[in-house]
Amino acid sequence: MEIGPAGNVYVLDWHDAFICGNNIQHKDTGRIFRMAPNKSLAKDWEGRYEDVQKLSDAKLISYQTNASSWHARRARVVLHGRAIKGKLDKGTHSALKQMFRKNKNPDYRLRALWALHITDGLNESDNLNNLNDKDEHIRAWSIQFLCEDKNPSSSALKKFASMANQDSSPVVRLYLASAMQRMSLENRWDIASGLITHAEDADDHNLPKLIWYGIEPLVPENPARAMELAQASQLPLVTEYIARRATDARQLETLSRAMGKIKSEATISNMLVGFSAGLKGINEINTPASWPETYEKIEKYPLAKEIAAILGDTESNKAFISTLDNPKANIDERRSALKNLASKKHMALKSRLIGLLDNNDLSNASIQAMALYSEKSFSQELLERYPNMNVEEKSATIQTMASRASYAQNLTDAIKSGVVPRNDLPEYIVQKMRRIAGPRFVDIWGMAKSSGVVKSGEKFQITISTIEGKMLYDIKEFEVKTGDSVSLKFRNLDFPPHNLLIVKPGKADEVAKMAIELGDKGFSKQWRPDTELILWGSTALNHKEEDLIKFIAPEPGNYPYVCTFPGHAMMMRGVMKVVPR
């Protein structure tokens, strides 16, 4: 969007219905819209439509007090270009400085300041003096100018620290917070110490976050000093995030000791929120030595009790690991330790599971635990050992291999190569494999036989295509009966890539979100996330490609189908209605 010299607004718009594809199909769909009132109220003057490039420096300077922001801005661009080429008139800077000092209009003063900066008309002394200006925006922009080279002087840093404490303007504090990211870590402390004391900024939409962005790398750098910031902070978000970052950096002892000394209930509450959030997802935690003493002082807080339970659980995890690693320990106790660690998906267990396969008393439990982790080496190891396993181990292996989409693909390959005999798969595993392994398994296995759960039905064939340029399936709904042998041909007649995934009832949005979260891995995964929420589906098809999806219609319900290519799911969806036979 841009404004023109007459005050009209110009909007550039470009549209390509096939933007998702690799090729640009339409190069002539760009449009420029001009929006203007029927009768313009903009003042006219002589030279309004002159070529700004041909005007003198004096004329360009006069445009900084013009009501037309377009002319003022274009004039600064021209002055900038002349300064780079060394072609500014000698009196240009003095004229701009005169305007900056004498003009009463704050907007015009800012324009003069911007013009001076981009034409190299300001030195450090000028910018330092401007930090005392009565206009908060002049002070703020001067902070930015002093930090543009990411190396503010000691004089500037000293003034910044004073302003962080004393300046009454939230605009200035916003620029100081942003400036912290343009200086060394050591130089941020004094500025941060001042910014966190302004309780009036606690509910500001931007300030607490920007202040935190400047503080974040300081926490692992000097945890003890960061705790002093947390204790002094009047900004709940910053206090909480400092505690969370300290937890993430495994500085629990420093955090625990600091919390034991804090008197403010609000500060303790905020730090507990951060402490609790930081502990989530961490399986191996060393309980801080000072925690028992700290806990006595803060146990009245509900979150303190939750944290204590987690830290106490950590001690029990250590005992379980010790028992599991002890070959002389009672085998039932070792098996119990393994199951307890598995129930928590403990990372320390993951590295031990392959080794435990050599223990006949623990191999079964180890195979079952492997289902909890997405680890390529597990499926490879199990399939290599499969021919020499006993019946129980083979059964556990097949169940584990059918628990994850990635493992299921490896099991499919093993069935194809004959490593795993077809007769080793019970019918309920076959049904599960057809859901999570998809067309590859169906091609190798064939149509699944009926089971006690799904009764055999009739053959049902359907073709669903995409509509060119519409981001839609041509069939939004179809009905089958439980037990029907369904053959769904999916054709992509559109130019962007599309897929068709049939998911569990009510899970279309969740699966679409999971596909987006694949990020740059999406193309290699065909925008098909590893989840049991997907029952059947196609690969991602390019223009005029097709795929065949075969399955047995499941129990009655409404099963959505959706395209999970990013941005497509809102429009490209339908429903397969399964009714009782």
Image (cartoon, rainbow, N blue to C red):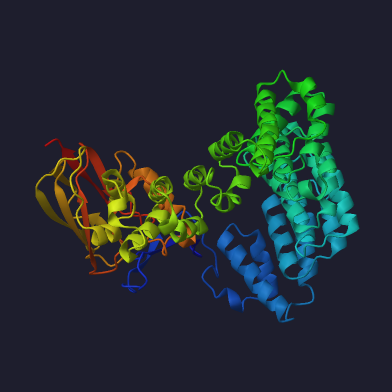
In front: 215, or 464?
464
Q: Is 305 located above or below residue 470 in the figure?
A: above
In front: 324, or 50?
324
How many numbered marks, from 0 up?
0
In front: 565, or 288?
288
Residue reaching furthest top? 300
Res. 474 image quadrant: bottom left
482 vs 381, left or right, is left
Q: Is 540 located above or below residue 362 in the figure?
A: below
Q: Is 378 located above or below residue 478 in the figure?
A: below
Q: Going 31% across and 72% down the picture, which residue do you hit?
A: 26
Image quadrant holding the C terminus, namely top left
Q: Going 71% across and 62% down the picture, which residue do you hit?
A: 114
Percent x, y of residue 260: 82, 27
In front: 294, or 148?
294
78 vs 221, left or right, is left
Q: Is residue 468 visible?
A: yes
Percent x, y of residue 205: 62, 39
Percent x, y of residue 226: 81, 42
Q: Is 564 located above or below residue 296 in the figure?
A: below
Q: Is residue 262 visible?
A: no
Percent x, y of residue 275: 69, 35
